[in-house]
Image (spheres, rainbow, N blue to C red):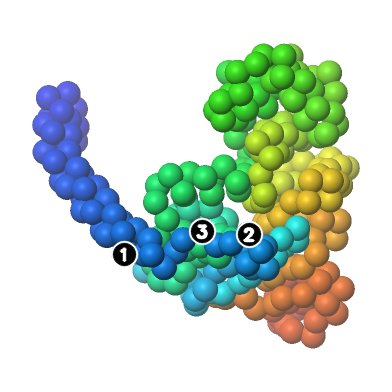
Amino acid sequence: MFDSPLLVLLCILLALPLALLVLAIRRRRRARTVSAGAASNPSLPAQQESSLPLIELNDVHKSFGSQKVLNRLSLKIQRAETLGILGMSGGGKSVLLQLIVGLLWPDRGEIRFKGRSLEEMSESDLLDVRRRVSYVFQSGAIFDFLSVGENIAYPLRERGMADEEQIDRRVEELLDAVELEGMGDHGYDELSLGSKKQVAIARAIASNPEAILYDEPTAGVDPMIGKTLSRLIRKLNRRNNLTSVVVTHDLQCLATVSDRIILLKDGRIHFEGDLEALYSSPDPFVQAFVTGRHPDGKIAS
């Protein structure tokens, strides 16, 4: 259809003004929202702020086309808590993480960080939230053109640290924290998937965040490495007093890291409790998820 380079260029030139118009409209709408909300969304006094949940979702809806992913979901995540999130594939778990950090916006509802609405924040305030909340992607998402040490140093340099000796010391501390001592000079291709995830975790904690969001941290690794990663997450949470949200299908991981678990179904929280309550729940859907069988007894595909 697009064999001619000139035709491709013409299509781009025709589409560009429309794209710029849509972007401008969205920015104006957002600017009006920020202006209107500024008076009602100031920074809270430290004492009042510390008494609030770190992250709060109120009546959140999110759809993609005709597919409703989250439906009137409300959730509070406390400071220094590790929340595990379970659910079927495509059930909105990763979407929930992206909403928390402001990579996606809800269709309806509100998301708050330390008592402040993300929707009413300025771009600079949103950037500050993203610095305070680190995201560890399922693949690790480390740079394949940088060494291990350079990957970990990247957020330090982004935040303005310029003293190379200070950066080197911090990188060594982080390598030690994630049990990769002496591997700073290793390249991307020298790392196993488990090691790549460890590097991603080191990079995530480099900037001293208040919260870390983990998307399937043990996916794709063998049970022994999965257990090591789970233990590492728990150790770092306790050492750094972190709030963590862990999306996973790995019940053994949740047994190690989680203080509380939620199970999503049809875009809502279907179950909430600890691991013992999850296993002992008489609810057919919960038992089907835990055992890998449908409520009618068939093995889930």
Of tags 1 and 2, the one toward the viewer is 2
Q: Residue at x 49, y 76 (%)?
A: 59
Farthest residue toward the bottom? Answer: 282
Badge 3 marks a residue whose secondary structure is loop
Classify residue 285 by image quadrant. bottom right
| Residue 12 locus on image (x, y percent) | 17, 34
Residue for badge 3 = 43
Return the residue at label 1: 36
166 or 225, nearer to the observer: 166
Q: Amino acid at mark 3?
A: Ser
Q: What SS does tag 1 mark?
A: helix
Q: Residue at x 73, y 83 (%)?
A: 284
The residue depicted at 80 percent of the width and 64 percent of the height is 259
Q: Quadrant of residue 28?
A: bottom left
Q: Is residue 68 above or below residue 128?
A: below
- Where is residue 70 drawn, in percent x and y? 50, 70
Which amino acid lies under the numbered mark 2 shown in the image of this protein? Ala
Other residues around mark 1 within 10 Å, as few (<14) / some (14–19) / many (≥20): few
Q: Give the residue at mark 2.
A: 46
| Residue 76 visible within the image | yes
- Tell me, yes or no, if residue 98 can be seen here: no
Mark number displayed over residue 60: none
Q: CA distance from mark 3 to mark 2?
A: 9 Å
Residue flagged by tag 1: what amino acid is it? Ala
